[in-house]
Image (cartoon, helix red, strand yellow):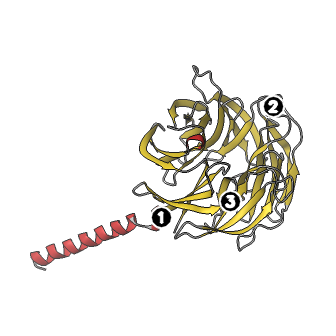
Amino acid sequence: MTVSRRVCLQWVFLLLALVTVSAASDSPKNKYLLFVGTYTAKESKGIYAYRYDAASSEVAPLGVAAETTNPSFLSIDPSHRFLYAVNEVPDYKGGNTGAVSAFAVDPRTGKLSLLNQVGSRGADPCYIAFDKTGKYALVANYTGGSVVVFPLRADGHIAESSAFVQHAGSSVNHERQEGPHAHWIEITPDNRFAIAVDLGLDELLVYRFDAKTGSLTANLPPYAKLDAGAGPRHLTFHPNGKFAYVVNELQSTITTFSYEASAGALHKLQTVTTLPKAFSGSNDTAEIHVHPGGKFLFASNRGHDSIAVFAIDGHTGALTLVDHFPTQGKTPRNFEIDPTGNLLFVANQDSNTIVVFRIDPNSGRLTPTGRTLHVPSPVCLKFMPTE
């Protein structure tokens, strides 16, 4: 082979490699839709959509995806074909209940088509999640103080509920804990138990979940207690499944639990504040997430208007404060880590903005990227791949 021919072939291989790399960077794996749930009492019309390129971090607005009332929390099914929203209202079709809406997703446009809407069997539903099979949706009714399981049909429609549990009791805060207020419910990593977080009872209620029938039955032990007046709001598991973290809205704290998977039992380990020592104003915590890498935990403060970042000890689950980072907006409610684990999107409800931060992979510290999205009353963020 001549030198010139060898050099020519080397250039051909180099060009092919560059084309392959370019194609990989444009792979659908880097393409997502970002859906935003809102409160619609003011300017919002419902659910908004954005197109997100994880490779370039570019975000493009797609406008209103669906008009619906108070879609305060969203969940996307594992097949990425359907989106479900709770409609956080106290009165649906004349009954003392909110609603749950099912939508088909158009991955090309981000538009949502309503499939059906059902009563949530309790007032003001505020959370929805799936079991690991994707065949059931679990809903927490805040004012109703109850949790519900809905079977999901293959075509995405919501069927009649397969389980309903009414919580009962109260706690020490007479204004906020006069009765049960279910605020969160999800399935454990092994799909055997459902954990319901009840702000009004200061309890994490544990139910055995039957994935064949969609039923809930009280576990033994049936619950784990938080400190009186803590007001637990949301829970998140560590990726290793050994620890669970609960953000307490009324006391602005985070409680760490070890999780005994064989028994569905939670054991309290530690409670830390989400606020700086010098802060003396009013504050309510909102969202909590563990970074996919398992090294850091994030929680939002409404009042201090910050994200509190903690380092996680992978062996003990213990939290150590990294720092507090201003969200550049008012009332940071929900936030979401992007699918790459590189960026954190914060929904500032009362300033009508979503502010994007970069996560330092070594320290967990947050740095503003300069990107700010404008959407009325944002309260929930969900990414969906568009492969």
The amino acid type found where label 2 is placed reads: Glu
- The residue wearing badge 2 is 175
Q: Nearer the viewer, mark 3 or mark 1?
A: 3
Q: Residues within 10 Å of mark 3 (few under 14, many from 20)?
A: some
Q: Element at badge 1?
A: helix
State left or right for residue 182 relative to residue 295. Answer: right
Position of residue 279 measured from the top left corner of the image (x, y, whole percent): 59, 22
Q: Is residue 315 visible?
A: no
Q: Earlier in the sequence, mark 3 or mark 1?
A: 1
Please state which of residues 166 and 379 is positioned toward the viewer in this rendering. Answer: 379
Q: Nearer the viewer, mark 2 or mark 1?
A: 2
Q: Earlier in the sequence, mark 2 or mark 1?
A: 1
Q: Kindly indicate the quadrant of the structure image that contains residue 9.
A: bottom left
Q: Which mark is residue 29?
A: 1
Q: Element at badge 2?
A: loop
Position of residue 290 measured from the top left corner of the image (x, y, whole percent): 58, 43
Q: Residue at x 84, y 42 (%)?
A: 221
Q: Kindly indicate the quadrant of the structure image that contains residue 74.
A: bottom right
The amino acid type found where label 1 is placed reads: Lys
The amino acid type found where label 3 is placed reads: Thr
- The residue wearing badge 3 is 68
Q: Residue at x 57, y 24 (%)?
A: 276
Position of residue 375 measured from the top left corner of the image (x, y, whole percent): 55, 51
Viewport quadrant of the N terminus: bottom left
Mark 2 in CB contact with mark 3 (< 8 angstroms)? no
Position of residue 126 measured from the top left corner of the image (x, y, whole percent): 73, 49
